[in-house]
Amino acid sequence: MIGQRLLRAILLASVCLPSNALANAPQNTNIAGPSASATGNVTNQAVQVLQGPYSTTSFGSGVVCQGTTMSVSTFATGNNNYNWDPEAYLTGNRNLGITLGVSVPLDGEAVELCKERARTEITRQQAEADKARLDFELVRLLKCGEAMKAGVRFHPQSPYAAICADVIIITPPGPPPPEPKPRPKHETSQVPQESNQEVATETGPE
C-alpha cells in the first residue's frame, strides 16, 4: 500500500513539474507574406504589303508604257478572347489602317522614249480619223447632191432630214461662146480692096 501511494505521488509530480524540453522548445514566428499574380496574353498582328507590277498604259499598235505606281489599300484586323467564366469580361481588339506603296522605274530615259512613241502613235491615229471623216463628208456631199438634182429628199419630219440639210446645189455657168475661126489670108486681103472701091464709087463726082 505504501509503495503504491509513493508511485502515484512520483507520477503526479512528474506531470506537474515543468519539463526542460518544453522550456527549450523553439518559438515559431508567423509573418504574413501577401502575393499577387496576373495573367494575360499579347497578340502580334502584322500587315504585309505586296508590290505588284508597274501600271501600264497601252496606246495601240503595241505601244505600252510603264510609269510610277502608287498603291493605297486599307486593312482591318481584330480578335476576341472568350472565357467560360460567366463573371469574366469579353476581351478583344480591333485595328484599322491604310497601307501606301510607291514604285518608281529607275530608267527614266526609257520612259521618256516610250512617251514620245506614244505621242507619235496618237498623231497617226488622229490623222487616220480625220481622213476617214473627210471621206465620209465627201461621199455624203456627192450623194446628197445627186439626190437633190434628181428631186429626191427626206421628209422634213424625218430624223434623217438633217443629213443633207447643209448641202447646197449651185447651177454651174453655161459653156463659153465658141471662138471665131481664123479666115484665110486671101480673104482678108480682098476685103479691104472691095471696101475701097465702094468708098470711091460713093464719093465720085456728082
Image (tube, rainbow, N blue to C red):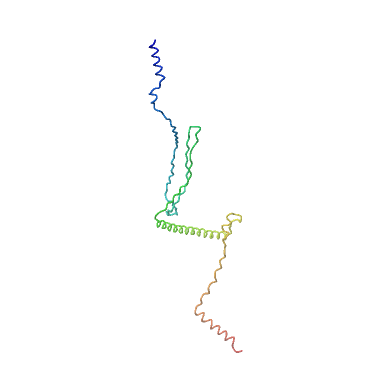
Q: Position of residue 102 (x, y in %)?
A: 44, 51
Between 149 and 163, the residue placed more toward the observer is 163
Between 80 and 194, the residue placed more toward the observer is 80
Q: Position of residue 103 (x, y in %)?
A: 42, 51
Splitting the image into 4 quarters, where does residue 120 fall?
Answer: bottom left
Between 180 and 21, the residue placed more toward the observer is 21
In the displayed structure, 115 sits above or below 3; it is below
Q: How many marks?
A: 0
Q: Residue furthest front?
A: 2
| Residue 165 horizontal side relative to residue 55, left or right | right
Q: Position of residue 110 (x, y in %)?
A: 40, 56
Splitting the image into 4 quarters, where does residue 31 fall?
Answer: top left
Locate the C terminus by quadrant: bottom right
Q: Residue furthest top?
A: 1
| Residue 203 horizontal side relative to residue 50, left or right | right
Q: Position of residue 154 (x, y in %)?
A: 59, 56
Between 27 and 146, the residue placed more toward the observer is 27
Locate the N terminus by quadrant: top left
In the displayed structure, 54 sits above or below 90; it is below
